[in-house]
Image (cartoon, rainbow, N blue to C red):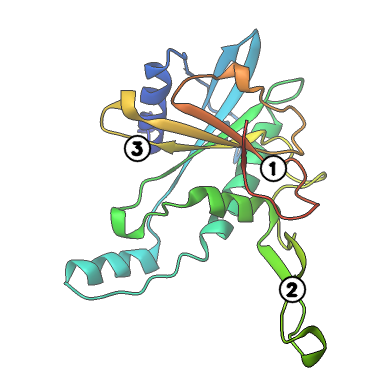
Amino acid sequence: MQVQPTKSEIDTCAFFSSINVDLKRISESKVLNEKSPDYFFTSNDVRIIVEVKQLEENDQELEVADSINDGKLVAYDQSNCSQRIRDKIKKTNRQLKRHCDSSNPGVLILQDVRPFFTRNFWLGHSIQEAMFGARTNWRTFPTHLNGYRSRTVADVFSHTGRATRYDKNQYVSCIGVLSADEDSRRSKLTFYHNPYAFFPLPTTYISNLRVRHYEIADPFGSYEDWRLL
């Protein structure tokens, strides 16, 4: 039985086609309960493995959408988005592990397909928190000894529950956030690179004006934001 492609798979294929990259479907594994990644493409004679996932509405978000449709004012907390991304990184790593067995970079393409009111427009920040932990700022307590002025002692990643590190989820070379448009020629893809990946994805392997690459070089040091490569 042929499985119908998801919206994110359709949009991903359309985007790669618009930048002249030939995505090919990977055959599904015949092993029970073993799921293969979705696609691969070849660049510089290297096969890049691609898994596509999407953020969909959960029960809480469906309730929020119903309340908005009823004309109600709703306060909505998206603090669990990083955990949802963390779970997708872990699942993708398991799928990629069986295919990235030599020097093949593995890519997770993520698209937020939720409606406008529950969509996350700051996915780069949520991915940063999912990969490296929440930003933690340590400050001195203001007293008469310091003139009642607080100063920053340390500004770091908390590392608690982080999905990527030197011994975790290293088959995910990077996470690509797809911002899809009805006209795929206006869609954009933003890659956030994993500094601990076994097989990093060179930026030259997928280069286009509508593709951007970001990295955080040393997430165990002081806090830093994504840097454009």
* Percent x, y of residue 71: 17, 72
Which element type, helix, strand or loop, lies under badge 1?
Answer: loop
**Amino acid, disc 1:** Ile
Compared to 175, does 46 lie above or below? above
User: Callout 1: few (<14), some (14-19), or many (20+) C-alpha neighbours within 10 Å?
Assistant: some
Q: Residue at x 31, y 69 (%)?
A: 64
Which element type, helix, strand or loop, lies under badge 3?
Answer: helix
**Amino acid, disc 3:** Lys
- The residue beneath circle 1 is 216
Tell me the tag on residue 69.
Answer: none
In this view, the mark in front (2 or 3): 2
Compared to 12, does 20 lie above or below? above
- The residue beneath circle 2 is 151
In this view, the mark in front (1 or 2): 2
Q: Is 70 situated left or right of 172 in this image?
A: left
In this view, the mark in front (3 or 1): 1
- The residue beneath circle 3 is 7
